[in-house]
Amino acid sequence: MNKKETMYTIGLDYGSDSVRSLIVNVETGEEVAGAVFEYPRWKKGMYCDANKNQFRQHPKDYLEGLELAITEALKQVSAEVANQVVGISVDTTGSTPVAVDEKGVPLALTHGFEDNPNAMFILWKDHTALQEANEINELARKWEVDFTRYEGGIYSPEWFWAKLLHVLREDPAVFRAANSWVEHCDWIPGLLTGRTRPRQLKRSRCAAGHKAMWHEAFNGLPSEEFLMALDPMLGGWRERLYSETYSSDVAVGKLSDEWAEKLGLSTDVLVGVGAFDAHIGAVGGEVAPYRLSKVMGTSTCDMLVVPMEEAGEKVVEGICGQVDGSIIPGMLGLEAGQAAFGDIYAWFKRLLMWPAERILAKTNIVNEEQRELLIQEMADQLMKELAEEADKIGIEESGVLALDWMNGRRTPDANPTVKGAMAGLSLGTDAPRIFRAFVEATAFGSKAIMNRFLEAEMRIDEVVALGGVAKKSPLVMQIVCDVLNRPIKVARSEQTCALGAAMMAAVVAGEYSSVAEAQEKMGSGFEHTYHPIPEHVEKYERIYKSYQTFGQLVESGLSN
Amino acid sequence: MNKKETMYTIGLDYGSDSVRSLIVNVETGEEVAGAVFEYPRWKKGMYCDANKNQFRQHPKDYLEGLELAITEALKQVSAEVANQVVGISVDTTGSTPVAVDEKGVPLALTHGFEDNPNAMFILWKDHTALQEANEINELARKWEVDFTRYEGGIYSPEWFWAKLLHVLREDPAVFRAANSWVEHCDWIPGLLTGRTRPRQLKRSRCAAGHKAMWHEAFNGLPSEEFLMALDPMLGGWRERLYSETYSSDVAVGKLSDEWAEKLGLSTDVLVGVGAFDAHIGAVGGEVAPYRLSKVMGTSTCDMLVVPMEEAGEKVVEGICGQVDGSIIPGMLGLEAGQAAFGDIYAWFKRLLMWPAERILAKTNIVNEEQRELLIQEMADQLMKELAEEADKIGIEESGVLALDWMNGRRTPDANPTVKGAMAGLSLGTDAPRIFRAFVEATAFGSKAIMNRFLEAEMRIDEVVALGGVAKKSPLVMQIVCDVLNRPIKVARSEQTCALGAAMMAAVVAGEYSSVAEAQEKMGSGFEHTYHPIPEHVEKYERIYKSYQTFGQLVESGLSN
């Protein structure tokens, strides 16, 4: 007989394309079941316009996913396991806000706004609010209190206020109909607990602090005067939003009757305060003091936690924010990131695939089936072959230097207008040499972020790597390791976001008294550790200086 | 009956890989026969080491070519035509000098030096004398008379004195055995006339003035003191070389008995003073005052002739030299050029072909024959497809900016250490956008040269384009035309070098009293004229400024 019954929690991870559920054994961290639901409207490209960088998601995509991702996972386990689920926590992309009515219903679910993209969730990567972000930055520069201070000093078009202001300007009908605005990560816990009314919602500290200029030093959101100066229509909005925020160890409430029935779970299940995917992913990847957590995928999200007493009054400039409790309760959570990482390698692959897509695709030398197989084979093999050859090139050998700003620069010191560049090209420069230069450039971009933390006296002893690139590319990882001059541990779990949410749910449910304890018991550990190679470190220190010089020249010298 | 018998001349064009003969009707310019002989030792890669940029050619390659190229061409015509040949003129690559004995025999043809690369012709593109060129430049900067003044102010490792000095240092045995040094373009006319002894040779004004710092203002070559300061071993060498030089309208002499017999020609045939291929090619392409002649191939050679009375004391800085009579007798001949032009497009093609060469080449989806056909098809189609897509991209649309210094910069202001670069890359930048940016960069490189002429008050009304790129790439030509803002005429003849040599031979033989007259009668004219499109001109003026800025940033800011 078990001395103690085995308990389970559910982590729910809303990504950009799909939502994933994971049922985890609270005692062992075993991932016993999971399911993925792809957003059907999003998949069809509805409500989006890539040319305008408009990316919207319909609340029905999230709603259907909420039910199906959890019920599909529960089908894979016994009724006993379902009965032993004690908590659910959620992470989502962000800032991904939506305008809601007085009941907290997203306007796209209300009459008259069903197909209006401005009444839907505005996905993190939507860039329609460029102009409004500029306005916010200009005003912030002039204001006596710098409300962007704890968000790195530069407000992004991807963030809450810029998006709200954009809809105010572009679609007054939506703005007038809105009672409040809600982040995706706040809406889902509200739904599950039946507490969606704007004033009932427990707002995420993570979302508020990193994206909405909320800070204790400001007694909450930016002042009424600041908001009115931005636009008189914002008058009263500070009140209509929120002043309190919560870290993710706090329970929003218990599962509502409605959702308990829909999901087949008990109404005793506790639902935690939501947070952003990268932050919760860092928890799943066992982030801890002095350990920089890097989610390395198409872009990177670099997170660090520092005990509050150690952080003191230190402010790290030019990052995406520092917020008390945004990652782990009681600790300062710092976020930074590169706007493109794996995306740059994918770009180079697309570049090299051009002749195949263009010429091989219409050849008559082989039949249609062979054509497709050949193109597929090239696409499948290319990164491996490039990495293999790039690995043979000595550091400093090719003389090719690149800048990793193909998608602008997020941190340090956000500048969305800068671009990628290359120097040192000769007639002998081949594809592997260019590939290696871009791998080095992305590693230098990582170093620029780490250095910014170090310059602000934030200690970093080692790096934890999560995400696709971390698991799939040893060449990239060793170069990043050599450039950063820190050991890099690669997290074992494939699903650190959903796992982190399950850990948080275990804390919320009272199974553990701290996140650290949940991490210790439920963590999957690390599958591999990279160690810096001293002679590489030394060479990369030299090349990093050239990278910095090149960056300064291009950024300050070229206007385009 | 003809009032006047039809006369013929032979133009002999020694290129980097082969020698070509052309028998031309002096009255009409009709190219009645021709033959090409590829250098057999060179083709095998003998005496070369690409890693060291060592490129040497054995005199036997030239000797065998001399006989076979002419006799093969003569086989194609009647004995009557052979009897009516009145002149032969020669052009060669340069500076391509060789150490010779007291009889003017290249040392590689003498006992003990048969396989010694230092005893062979040192091809123009050999870069083994980098260090020696630096020494010459350093000394020239300090000397009271600037002997590099008429060669653009910077002495190149590709030129006569650097190569001589390099052999002096590296191979004292060769240096000691040498009685003199001779350019390829001087040796061939010497051979044909039996006047190879160093003091009998009629040295080319073109070679001496552009590559050996010969100038009337210096009374010939650089002073004894200067040469002694360079290396005491050079003492006496000014005397052992030459003080007189000749333009290519001058006859070296008549065909020797030996060569008349070998070739099956009369001993009455006059042989002209030789010159460099690009200069003679400009003559064949009907260079004339106010007409910039651009040989556009892997690299470019840009030539301009200016009436001496108009040139006055003007000096164009940072080009490859300005020499009285080096192109057309009585006119100042100015030479400049880009170190890489078509080579850059070929580089980009190689880059894009990497996946095919690497993955398609070993696929098992199709058989070996199909593999080869597929790769061949991609290689054959790629430039056409790239040009087609690049043509659709609006000017200023992509924001990609490139520097064309992949092979260093020859002019203006030689700098062999600068490299190619790119800026303005985004995740949407595709292969045609990069290709177009490099086409624009090569055009900007052309403009930088043209502007240098214009700044020195040398008038340029139109451009004549010769060479492979000129005939094959309308996209490139229109962009160059728009960037230069000058009409560009494309020469009709495929063989402007050999044709130019035949024109020169007609002047040497007294068939015409001037080069202009020979050009008028024997020229093939132009097959197409490009005209600048005003709205393109304006846009490119803006982008050219960015190109200059980018170039300055990279050249002065990046040390590598």
Image (cartoon, coloured by chain):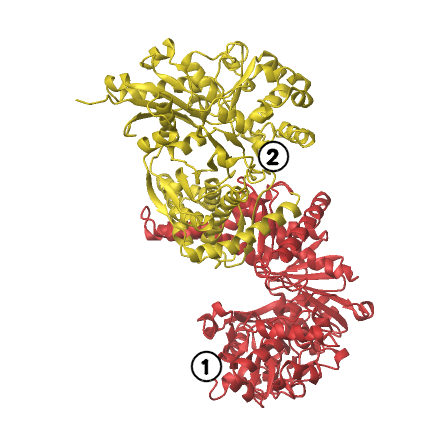
Chain colours: A yellow, B red
State which quadrant residue A411 falls in.
Answer: top right
State which quadrant residue B528 falls in.
Answer: bottom right
Residue carrying label 2? A153
> Which element carries disc 1, helix, strand or loop?
loop
Query: What is the CA distance from the residue labelled 2 to the residue labelled 1?
Result: 70 Å
Q: Taking B369 as reference, is A119 above or below it?
A: above
Nearer to me, B521 or B214 = B214
Horizontally, residue B548 falls left or right of residue A462, namely right
On the rendered image, what quadrant is the C terminus of chain B found in? bottom right
- The answer to whether dots 2 and 1 both sit on one chain is no
Rendered residue at 26%/20% (across/down): A81
Residue type highlighted by circle 2: Gly
On the rendered image, what quadrant is the N terminus of chain B found in? bottom right
Check whether the beta carbons of the residues at disc 2 and disc 1 lie within 8 A of each other: no
Residue type highlighted by circle 1: Asp
The location of residue A345, given as percent across then percent down, is 46, 44
Q: Classify 10 Å Cα crowding around label 1: few (below 14), some (14-19), many (20 and above).
A: some
Residue carrying label 1? B115
> Which element carries disc 2, helix, strand or loop?
loop
Horizontally, residue A204 falls left or right of residue A366, namely right
Question: Does residue A23 appear in this view?
Answer: yes
Which chain contains the residue that carries disc 1? B
Q: Taking A77 as reference, is A288 above or below it?
A: below
Checking the image for residue A342, the label placed there is none
Which chain contains the residue that carries disc 2? A
Q: Nearer the viewer, mark 2 or mark 1?
A: 2
Q: Residue furthest bottom?
A: B102
